[in-house]
Amino acid sequence: MTYTYLDRINTPADIKGLTMEELPSLAAEIRDKILQTVSANGGHLSSSLGVVELTIALHYVFDAPRDRIVWDVGHQAYAHKLLTGRRRAFSTLRQFGGISGFPRREESRYDTFTVGHSSTSISAALGMAEARDLRGEDHKVIAVIGDGSMTAGLAFEGLNQGGALKKDLMIVLNDNEMSISPNVGALSSYLSRHMTGDFYVSIQKIVENLLRNIPGIGEPMLKAAKRLEDSLKGLVVPGMVFEELGFEYVGPIKGHRFDRLIRTFENVKKLNRPVLVHVATQKGKGYEPAEKRPSLFHGVGPFDRETGTLHGKPAGAPTYTEVFGKMLTRLAFEDERIVAVSAAMPGGTGLKYFAEKIPDRFYDVGIAEQHGVTFSAGLATEGFKPVAAIYSTFLQRAYDQILHDVCLPDLPVVFAMDRAGLVGDDGPTHHGNFDLSYLRHIPNLVLMSPKDENELQNMIKTALDCRHPAAIRYPRGRGEGVELDPYPRTLPLGEAERLSLGEDVAIFAVGHTVSPALRAARLLKQKGIHASVINARFIKPIDRKMIRELAGETNYFVTVEENSLLGGFGSAVLEVITEEGLSDVRIHRIGLPDLFVEQGPQEMLRRIYGLDDKGIARQVDRFLRSQRTDPVIHFQHENENR
Ligand SMILES: Cc1ncc(C[n+]2csc(CCOP(=O)(O)OP(=O)(O)O)c2C)c(N)n1
């Protein structure tokens, strides 16, 4: 596919050679390219389509990379990528070895900040503006943040400092009235009182005329008129809150009109102070299915571009997300103390079922994980049983709230951590590879991970019954296809489950690595290696009794987890082995190394990191071979008939 305009843009400087009349054609070509790529690869469609004009206008007026453009979350940066030298690589978007779905500093000098988690742009841009001033430079710094991302405390912390520092900083508030789902909260309703700027302008004119027509007008009268104007402005302009915080407010600007955007940016460029430009855009703009269903097309897998139908995933087991959402809703019908909390992701976490059925006990707090956790703690102090369903990667934000507000007072808040482990194409900002490490050391917390979707049901019940803070981590995607018990049961706290018996090696697996570990044991058996496979179930409290028991049977332990090896489940087993003085036990830990795992299909990444059945079998085999000098090892006698 060739494009008349897009093919000529190798750097943003090339856009400046286009006339204003040509820009809409460039926008149309960019939309076409985005649609072509995302319909094949999947990706964040609606947000990227919504900012095409905004992105072109920013690059038209400002001089990146000298001027710094900082994208918030970065899921909307596809047009930016296309305009900044990644046109040819764009077809590799989100693929293994391809370009990232988010801005990444190592990918391009136009990507000023590495993003994926939201609401960082104002703080980062403010830091860049401060650095510029410290160095005595004079370029511009622009943060582009969505109205959804503006719901986070972090964004307000940046505004708070930004208004006070009075830096030359432009914030573009990209307001499409949507987060992933419709945006929530008081700020959102405040902003969406979308009085167009025209109304305010007409008030300004009335005041001006009044003044002009009063002969011999004195100073006090002028001041009174100014006060009147200000108070009227406060009534009708959605941006007064930003003005009070020290930002000049400009807007709302129609975000798909080049003339408005470019004129505004050119004017604001001349100001050397904090300015917030409020731009109204439409999520999914230019592609009817996405305009109609912006949430569905926020983040999508491959789809048919002509019809807008998503390529159906082959029928199979329910996802962990669905099982969680349905079981929690069911238990909440039986227990009125159960309440559910989501941080802007009712769809992704499965809480939409809960929200539909029990809206009075469902809370979407916005992109505010920290607040969501402490809000849950507050509910728990009053006898409620809050379940905060937050992806593993986003819960990282709320570490201190988990530790200080929930676990220290031992409040019974349940954390449902979906998307734990490798998530796939979203890559390193979204993999949930650290939760075992960032939670395991917190006192009072029960930490568990189910081997399948039925055990997830049991763990939800266990967590709700245990009267302590409890966290359940489970993976992205479908379950194992096991039968779901009609009613969940409470598991004995801290009890692992032995799944197979073998005296050569004990494979201790956690979460969904249990299934590949079982399959690995079958492969090993063909080589004459007999493995016990244990479903750990609890990372904390860990089953010491089981570890002691196994140490009586074999000296060789292998742990398997889809978490960073540093501080993860294998480390927990090592600690027990040391503490219990089990000095004969040798241990090999399988898990993720000390690095940020790249993007790629889940199954491919599992293969690369040795977390699939063959990988586990290979590593167990290699480990045992490396121990061959040990005279007591059973499998030395591989030819023996067992
Ligand atoms: C800390 C954090 N929590 C949750 C998310 C998941 N998330 C990605 S985009 C998004 C909505 C962003 O809305 P907005 O900023 O308005 O941008 P839009 O997509 O509407 O352009 C959410 C909740 C995230 N990326 N980071």
Image: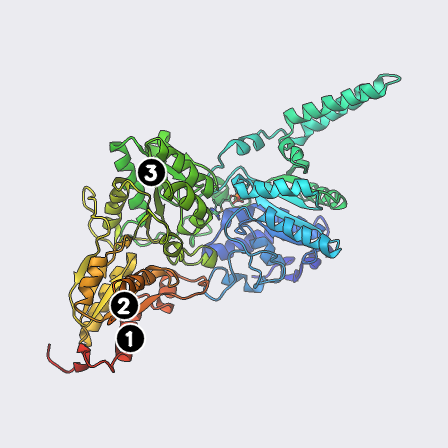
* Residue at the spot of label 1: 623
Whether the residue under disc 1 has CB within 8 Å of ligand 1: no
Inspect the image, locate mark 3, and give the three-letter code of the amino acid beneath it. Answer: Tyr
Residue under pointer 3: 353
User: In the shown orientation, is residue 302 left or right of residue 278?
Assistant: left
Residue 275 visible from this viewpoint: no
The answer to whether residue 605 is visible is yes
Q: Quadrant of residue 111?
A: bottom right
Crowding at label 2, few (<14), some or many (≥20) Cα neighbours within 10 Å? many
> Compared with residue 380, is residue 525 higher up or lower down, i.e. above or below?
below
Q: State which quadrant residue 164 falls in.
A: top right
Question: What amino acid type should be assigned to the residue bearing mark 2?
Answer: Val
Mark 1 belongs to which amino acid?
Answer: Phe
Q: Are marks 1 and 2 in contact (CB under 8 Å)?
A: yes
User: Along the polypeptide, which appears first: circle 2 or circle 3?
Assistant: 3
Rendered-image quadrant of the N terminus = bottom right
Of 70 and 33, the residue lying toward us: 70
Nearer the observer: mark 1 or 3; the answer is 1
Local secondary structure at mark 1: helix
Q: Is residue 580 above or below residue 394?
A: below
Q: In the image, what residue occupies the spot 67% across and 48% down?
A: 57
> Foreground: 3 or 294?
294
Q: Nearer the viewer, residue 398 or 21?
A: 398
Mark 3 Cα within 10 Å, few/some/many (few <14, many 20+)? many
Cβ of mark 3 under 8 Å from ligand 1: the answer is: no
**From the viewer's perspective, is the residue at label 2 or at label 3 nearer?**
2
**Mark 1 near mark 3, Cβ–Cβ under 8 Å?**
no
* Element type where label 2 sits in the image: strand
